[in-house]
């Protein structure tokens, strides 16, 4: 009985040692880390006291975005500039310009936000929220070129208003991961957009099937301008329709 227990004990020890060697021999899972965060003040004395507030807000946002987690050796880099800060009475206004760089020198994404608040810290917090929200939009705005006009230098891409893109957004074109051109959005529809490609890019460099990436969204004011233009067009059309109808009625009398 004692011999059998001894043998069972030896077998158990051997199994444990075997499992331990297998675990130690298995490849280690790469540790993932959030982006590095750096904040620069370009707003003088009014922005100096906001550097830590902005850094903490951006770090909190970036840690909550799983798409920004990468290896410790090659992390995303998030840099922000306090571009402007002012306080007048009980109102403050702060502008933040954020730039996010993908690992290993990848694409750079940019966002700007200018917000008001009861204090400079509150305004800075709102600007950080909006800037990171914009970065989240452009990070997920991915599509392809499905039509390209050599003469017009216009690329039709499968990214539209449904993905949060706005007029004047900046788009880069990639072929096999390499940048081959860029341009600005001139027309936005629900499911697609038209991008005016910079003329300095040879026409043949952008063609159907290239990847399209939004690296900076258009200003929110661009949407208001488009809506105002559409309202004016509808008003003009309604006026012309009423005038024609009035003319027809008058002619029939």
Image (cartoon, rainbow, N blue to C red):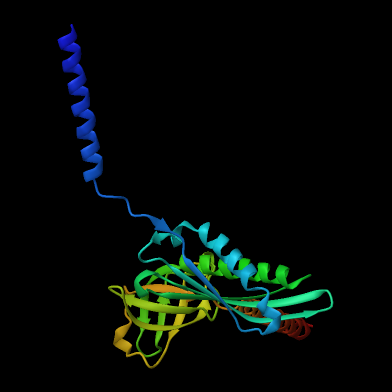
**Quadrant, the C terminus:** bottom right
Tell me, yes or no, if residue 45 can be seen here: yes
Q: Is residue 131 above or below residue 6?
A: below
Answer left or right for 109 relative to 236: left
Whether residue 52 is situated above or below residue 243 in the rendered picture: above
Residue under the point 32% across and 79% down: 207
Instruction: Give the farthest residue toward the top.
Output: 1
**Front-lying residue, 162 or 147:** 162
Q: Nearer the viewer, residue 114 or 194?
A: 114
Percent coordinates x, y for residue 130 in the rendering: 62, 68
In terms of image quadrants, where is residue 222?
Answer: bottom right
Image coordinates for residue 225, horizontal then vertical, percent: 65, 81
Identify the residue at horizontal 32%, vertical 50% (top origin): 29
Residue 75 falls in image quadrant: bottom left
Q: Nearer the viewer, residue 181 or 115?
A: 115
Q: Is residue 66 above or below residue 148?
A: above
Where residue 104 sits in the image (x, y, percent)? 34, 71
Q: Residue at x 33, y 74 (%)?
A: 210
* Mark count: 0
Q: Could one spot residue 241 in this view of the protein?
A: no
**Residue drawn at (71%, 69%), measured in percent from left and top?**
121
- Please state if 133 lies on the left or on the right of 102 as rendered: right
Compared across the picture, whether 143 is left or right of 115 comes to: left
Q: Quadrant of the N terminus?
A: top left
Place of residue 119 in the rendered image (x, y in percent of width and height, measured from the top left): 76, 71
Camera-nearest residue between 166 and 68? 68
């Amino acid at each position: 009985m004692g011999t059998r227990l001894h043998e069972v004990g030896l077998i158990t020890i051997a199994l444990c040692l075997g499992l331990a060697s297998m675990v130690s021999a298995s490849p280690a899972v790469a540790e993932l880390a959030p982006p590095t965060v750096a904040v620069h003040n370009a707003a003088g004395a009014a922005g100096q006291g906001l550097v830590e507030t902005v850094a903490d807000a951006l770090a909190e946002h970036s840690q909550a975005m799983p798409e920004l987690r990468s290896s410790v050796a090659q992390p995303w880099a998030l840099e922000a500039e306090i571009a402007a800060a002012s306080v007048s009475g009980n109102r403050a206004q702060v502008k933040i310009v954020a730039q996010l760089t993908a690992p290993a020198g990848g694409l750079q994404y940019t966002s700007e936000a200018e917000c008001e608040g009861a204090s400079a810290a509150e305004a800075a917090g709102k600007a950080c929220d909006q800037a990171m929200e914009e970065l989240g939009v452009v990070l997920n705005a991915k599509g392809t070129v499905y039509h390209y006009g050599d003469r017009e230098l216009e690329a039709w891409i499968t990214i539209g208003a449904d993905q949060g893109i706005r007029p004047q957004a900046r788009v880069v074109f990639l072929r096999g991961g390499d940048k081959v051109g860029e341009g600005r959005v001139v027309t936005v529809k629900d499911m697609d957009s038209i991008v005016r490609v910079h003329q300095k890019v040879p026409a043949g460099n952008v063609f159907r099937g290239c990847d399209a990436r939004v690296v900076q969204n258009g200003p929110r004011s661009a949407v208001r301008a488009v809506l105002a233009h559409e309202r004016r067009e509808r008003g003009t059309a309604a006026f012309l329709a009423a005038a024609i109808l009035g003319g027809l009625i008058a002619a029939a009398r």
